[in-house]
Amino acid sequence: MSPLETKISPLKMPVSSLWGVGAERAVQLARLDIRTVGDLLLHRPRRYEDRRHFRKIAELTKDEPATARGTIVASGLRHFRGGSKSVFEIILDDGSARLHCRWWNLPFMEKYFAMGDEVFVYGKLSETKPRVMTHPETEVIEGGEESFIHINRIAPVYPLTEGLPQRWLRGLIWRTLEKFEQHIVEPNIRASQIAGKVGQASSLPFFPTRANAVHMTHFPEELADVEIARRRLALDEFVELQRQIQQRRKTFESRAQALPCGGDNHLIKPFLARLGFKLTGAQTQVLREIRADLGGAHPIRRLLQGDVGSGKTAVAACTALMALESGFNVALMAPTEILAEQHFQNFSKWFEPLGVKVEMQTGSRKTSSIEHRTLNVEQGGGIHHASLFIGTHALLTSGFELPNLGLVIIDEQHKFGVAQREQLVRKGRYPHLLVMTATPIPRTLGLTLYGDLDVSVIDELPGGRGRIKTFIRAADKLPKVWEFIREKLAAGRQAYVVYPRVEESGEKGLKAVTKEFENLKTLLAPYLVGLLHGRLKGREKEEVMAAFRANAVKVLLATSLIEVGVDVPNATVMLVENAEAFGLAQLHQLRGRIGRGAHESYCILISDAKTAGASERLKVLAETTDGFRIAEADLKLRGPGELLGREQSGLPKFRFGNLADDLDLIRQARELVVKAG
Ligand code: ADP
Ligand code: MG
């Protein structure tokens, strides 16, 4: 190689430069996201087959998939139902017994096999007399000089795409490894450091280099090597990600100068005096962190986590007041109009007496300063021009200007994407940013998704709250449940009834919820029932919510729209129908609507879910109200994409890293990168 060529890593070359990869193969590989030699080397097997030891056909079972090996002694294709259906069968014999392998309606399978072929077969029996496997995975054993790649070893089995043979791909990866393994280099952070870290983290007996780990991923000597290799490669992925995160943060800090928003207490003092409750220790502690931060050299980038009902709004209010005291405008963004409206009411009530103007900006409602009360109230000899702007993503529209913006607060941050967060921040000259979330984020995700944010946690609920009891009931118990709810209504309490998926299922869902509404009205008369769903106009939503808040409407039939933020302490019953249709984090949020007052509260989850997974999930909720435990269970059960919801963008993809399990590695990666500076 010439010196010039050596500068570009050969791993960056396109796969089509490899021997044996033509245009058609390159297209197939691209479908697997394999474009470069490096991609090919990181193509992760989906399982491994230990081809040093086989199960005898006579010992195959219905319970456990296993690999056997036999010779084709018979084969045939049969058509039936006038030729519209077919079954193709081969019979394998290994001396111990015979095995029938069948493929339904895949007549072309015939061309892959010939009498006398030796075949690996992987699967479990669907019948035992005779022994049958339906649609097993097979691979014809071929002789020749490359046969050692495929037999008498632990063989990788890769994810494939149409037209790409397993055996061909395995051969390609073998040859590519032979040629390019030497070019796989350690990441900039020294291997010895990583080795030490992997060691501490896992107490593994040895620490492969990156090149070793890649090799072991494809052709492990022992099955235990696979996990060792995975952890090594996962660590590299996490290191790379943390490096990007730290880089982003450094760039940001080098460019951005903090606006002085520390405040002088002249608004906070009267605010707290009139609030009606004393802040909890956790709220006070978090505010201390935020105040110190606001006086720092860089604009704050802070995530405030606090379980549902922990009192994040009061913390947001105090933070807003610090910036307002300093003469800067503040923007507060909420994901739904209902929540924006609720904040608008609360903050108006809190801030107007202090002489701070509160403005509203949602899709359906904009308070202009003329129409709005004029609130340039004299206070302490000065006039406060700084205002609080509350809104939904309507705050992001390009025509909406926010001059003199000192602080951006985003409530229920997980409902917004990273891009939206940035869009709002860009309305000002590096304003401070406080994002709040009640979805307790599992620590793995916190460190990856929000790795560039400082984190404050409110880990204490205000006292004097009634307990929440959670029940899971089948739909045939509903009559009893309604009876129970009537009792609570008679005692003066209010209830939510949540009905799933109206937003998603369109007209049909709307009909269903409207019908349910009619039923409920009859069922619960004389108690008033209100209906709330995403298809209502902003004004209509407001009216229903106002009536519910005022305790005129006793029962609110709603979609998951009320999942976030809504705060009506007198409501003590949450009934969720088809509970299995919701994620755990979402149900936890819904449950967070109750238990906000002094009365005992009841969360009733109606589910006829038959699958083990669904009832297992719901059980987690009945067992704990600890949001962190619930979020972690949800992450394990559903994966990060589902947990965070479709709205969440910016979640990195890992080939080897596993966000549900690799907390130790993520921590190590962060530590390594921070230390390396
Ligand atoms: P979340 O953290 O879920 O946003 P909220 O801010 O809506 O919670 O607060 C939930 C309820 O608790 C509200 O009714 C609020 O007024 C009340 N609250 C907040 N802080 C305290 C406190 N320190 N003592 C008593 N009640 C509080
Ligand atoms: Mg809230």
Image (cartoon, rainbow, N blue to C red):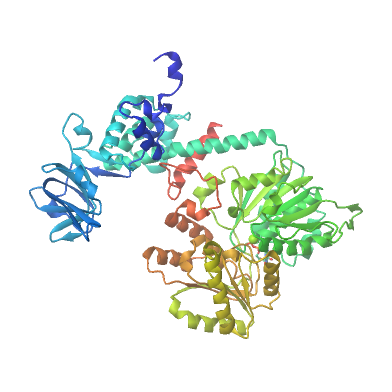
Q: Is residue 134 left or right of residue 514?
A: left
**The C terminus lies in which quarter of the figure?**
top right
Q: Residue extending furthest top?
A: 2
State the image coordinates of residue 76 (x, y, percent, origin top left). 14, 51
Quick check: can you spot residue 4?
yes
Q: Nearer the viewer, residue 369 or 664?
A: 369
Answer whether residue 137 is visible to the viewer in this image: no
Residue found at the far right of this picture: 381
As drawn, the residue found furthest toward the left would be 95
Above-or-below relation of 517 to 507: below
Seen in the picture, residue 19 relative to 395 is either above or below; the reply is above
Number of numbered markers: 0
Q: Nearer the viewer, residue 395 or 624?
A: 395
From the viewer's perspective, is 338 left or right of 18?
right
Q: Nearer the viewer, residue 365 or 568?
A: 365
Residue drawn at the location 59% of the way across and 58% of the way down: 438
Image location of residue 546, percent across then percent down: 70, 71
Which quadrant: the N terminus?
Answer: top left
Task: Judge whether 613 appears above or below 473 on screen.
Answer: above
> 305 and 593: which one is in front?
593
Q: Quadrant of residue 612?
A: bottom left
* Residue 296 screen position, x and y as percent: 71, 41
- The percent coordinates of residue 366 (x first, y second) are 76, 58
Q: Residue at x 27, y 33 (%)?
A: 171
State which quadrant residue 199 falls in: top left
Q: Quadrant of ligand 2?
A: bottom right
Q: Is residue 337 left or right of residue 640?
A: right
Residue drawn at x 48%, y 54% as measured from the top left? 642
